């Protein structure tokens, strides 16, 4: 697809390439930068690089190469603008191992954060009864017996409702995750 330079491609083809990687690029860069306008600028810079250097690529490694260009462009912007504080919280600075991380580790961190945000959003959309059970069991780490006592329910009812809550959470989360990544 990228066998020609940017000037040789039709506008529709350029747009197709741009849109196919835009969502990943936006999520990754915005997570690091936390500024919409700057994120858009970095995305444009990355895609200009992609379109200019694409002819030297084999189709088999196109996706990973595009993601690497996006990552490197964002990290270059951070270094150039000395805004590394947006990328790491204080925990990262306290651990030297985080400075030796591979770009794929950073990508995994971004995906993990996005997944957690989506999970919290999905939990908040569940019925209050399900949210309460999930909170007590997973966040407060209470046993079934403790939950039964606190909510004045039988252990069988708690087990059944917790199973339903997990099932609903899985259904809603899976649907959202798939929609977000397509």
Image (spheres, grey):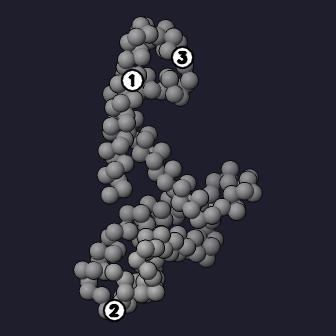
* Circles 1 and 3: CB atoms closer than 8 Å: no
Identify the mark nearer the N-term, 1 or 3: 3
Q: Nearer the viewer, residue 82 or 102?
A: 102
Residue at image mark 1: 163
Q: Can residue 66 be seen in this view?
A: no
Residue located at (49% from left, 22% from top): 136
Quadrant the C terminus occupies: bottom left
Identify the mark nearer the N-term, 1 or 2: 2
The mark closer to the camera, 1 or 3, is 1
Q: In this view, does 90 lie above or below 127?
A: below
Residue located at (55% from left, 73% from top): 72
Residue 115, image x and y in percent? 45, 47
Q: In which quarter of the image is residue 19?
A: bottom left
Label 1 Cα crowd, 10 Å radius (few <14 / some 14-19 / many 20+): some
Q: Quadrant of residue 27?
A: bottom left
Label 2 Cα crowd, 10 Å radius (few <14 / some 14-19 / many 20+): few
Q: Is residue 168 above or below residue 81?
A: above
Residue at image mark 3: 143
Residue 29, image x and y in percent? 48, 65
The mark closer to the camera, 1 or 2, is 1
Q: Is residue 78 above or below residue 122?
A: below
Q: In this view, does 86 lie above or below 16?
A: above
Number of the label disc, if any, that sits on residue 7? 2
Q: Distance between the residues labelled 1 and 3?
A: 14 Å
Number of the label disc, if any, that sits on residue 177? none
Residue 159, image x and y in percent? 42, 17
Q: Distance between the residues labelled 3 and 2?
A: 64 Å
Helix, strand or loop at mark 1: helix
Q: How far apart are marks 1 and 2 (CA)?
A: 56 Å
Q: Can residue 20 be seen in this view?
A: yes
Give the number of callouts.
Answer: 3
């Amino acid at each position: 697809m990228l066998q020609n330079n940017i000037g040789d491609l039709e506008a529709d083809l350029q747009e197709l390439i741009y849109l196919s990687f835009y969502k990943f690029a936006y999520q990754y860069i915005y997570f690091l930068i936390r500024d919409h306008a700057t994120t858009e600028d970095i995305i444009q810079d990355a895609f200009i690089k992609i379109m200019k250097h694409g002819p030297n690529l084999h189709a088999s490694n196109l996706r990973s190469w595009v993601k690497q260009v996006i990552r490197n462009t964002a990290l270059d912007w951070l270094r150039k603008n000395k805004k590394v504080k947006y990328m790491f919280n204080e925990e990262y600075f306290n651990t030297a191992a985080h400075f030796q991380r591979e770009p794929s580790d950073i990508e995994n961190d971004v995906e993990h954060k996005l997944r957690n945000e989506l999970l919290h959003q999905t939990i908040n959309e569940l019925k209050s009864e399900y949210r309460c059970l999930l909170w007590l069991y997973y966040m407060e780490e209470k046993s079934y017996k403790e939950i039964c006592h606190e909510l004045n329910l039988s252990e069988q009812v708690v087990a059944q409702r917790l199973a339903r809550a997990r099932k609903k959470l899985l259904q809603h989360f899976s649907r959202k995750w798939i929609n977000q990544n397509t």
